[in-house]
Amino acid sequence: MGGAYGKVFGPLMSPICAPLTQLHISDIRKTHHAYVNLEIAPGVSAPQFAQIFSCLRSAERTKVFKFFAEGSIHKRVDINEVFAVAILTATAFLSLKIRVLFQLYDLDDSMDLSLSETVMLLGSA
């Protein structure tokens, strides 16, 4: 986790990730809802990624997936890392971004982040 984040935010942002970084916060919420409804592990395949990020054009989805899957033996991406990049680069107030991150990682809906949820959030973001 975190490897792709460094690639995205290197000396110059990768143009491949531009569509992901231009998502509106409401699109990010919709994509997360789609991911939760699939009930799959954080490591997603290309078809699962396409289903989750249906708000992106097909060619953009393919490029973004390949970018994040580069170096992955199983050709899967850490969806939490993708969400973190999208949220951190979204055009929104910081307070809104923090609320969305909190909602994404409060996995048990307890309105409290456990130690493991906090570690997952920090590792992704």
Image: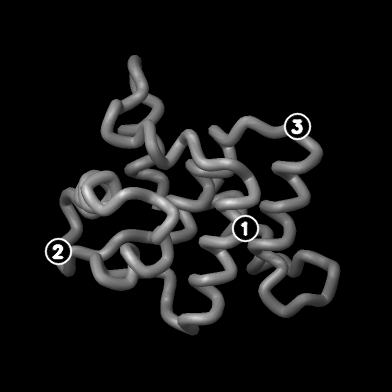
Circle nearer the N terminus (3, 1): 1
Going by the numbered disc 2, the residue's amino acid type is: Ile
Q: Where in the figure is residue 41, as x and y percent of width and height?
A: 42, 77
Image vertical order of residue 107 relative to residue 6, above or below: below
Secondary structure beneath dot 3 equals loop
Left or right of 60? Residue 96 is: right
What residue appears at the point 44 percent right and 54 percent down from the top-left corner? 55
Query: Which quadrant of the figure has residue 47?
Result: bottom left
Q: Where in the figure is residue 77, as x and y percent of width and height?
A: 31, 60
Secondary structure beneath dot 2 equals loop
**Total marks in image:** 3
Name the residue that disc number 2 marks: 73
Left or right of 28? Residue 100 is: right
Circle nearer the N terminus (1, 2): 1
Between 89 and 30, the one nearer to me in the picture: 30
The answer to whether marks 1 and 2 mark residues whose Cβ atoms lie closer than 8 Å is no
Q: Where in the figure is residue 106, as x and y percent of width and height?
A: 72, 68
Going by the numbered disc 3, the residue's amino acid type is: Phe
